[in-house]
Amino acid sequence: MQEYETSDIQIATLLLAEGITFIKVDSTNPKRKGFVFQYESRITDLVSGFWQDTIKIAPRKYMGAFKELKNKLYQ
């Protein structure tokens, strides 16, 4: 199974909100934790769209995903 990892919580939030399967928080490096997702080909488009400011997402959906990731960080 291929994985996609990012240490950027905003990107991770977008991926989670868009239904990309979350696998784990990678705590190997204590100074910089990573969010690991199951790889899907649409991740590239989502990340590009995020940086190009072309992604449309409901604010409550995004914030719900953000809270979920923050909880996973501190578990």
Image (spheres, helix red, strand yellow):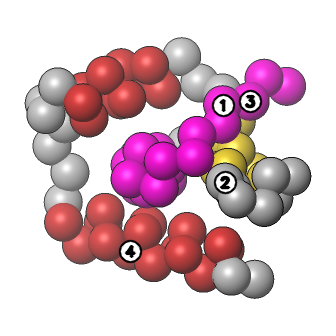
User: For mark 2, what is the residue?
Assistant: 32
Instruction: Determine if residue 22 is in view.
Output: no
Sequence-wise, the earlier of marks 1 and 4 is: 1
Q: Secondary structure at mark 1?
A: strand
Nearest to the observer: residue 5 or residue 55? 5
Residue 71 is situated, as x and y percent measured from the top left of the image, at: 60, 81
Sequence-wise, the earlier of marks 4 and 3 is: 3
Q: Which residues are magenta?
A: 1-17
User: For mark 3, what is the residue?
Assistant: 3
Q: CA distance from mark 1 to mark 4?
A: 21 Å
Count every numbered label the image shows and give the total: 4
Looking at the image, residue 47 lies above or below residue 8: above
Q: Is residue 30 left or right of residue 12?
A: right
Question: Residue, x 47% and y 55% (percent of image)?
Answer: 9
Tag 3: residue type? Glu
Q: CA distance from mark 2 to mark 3?
A: 18 Å
Sequence-wise, the earlier of marks 2 and 1 is: 1
Q: CA distance from mark 2 to mark 4?
A: 23 Å
Sequence-wise, the earlier of marks 2 and 3 is: 3
Q: Is residue 17 left or right of residue 22?
A: left
Q: Secondary structure at mark 3?
A: strand
Q: Nearer the viewer, mark 2 or mark 1?
A: 2
Q: CA distance from mark 3 to mark 1?
A: 4 Å
Disc 4 and disc 3 in contact, CB within 8 angstroms: no
Q: CA distance from mark 2 to mark 1?
A: 16 Å
Residue 75, quarter of the rendered image: bottom right
Instruction: Determine if residue 66 is in view.
Output: yes
Question: Residue, x 18% and y 60% (percent of image)?
Answer: 58
Tag 2: residue type? Arg
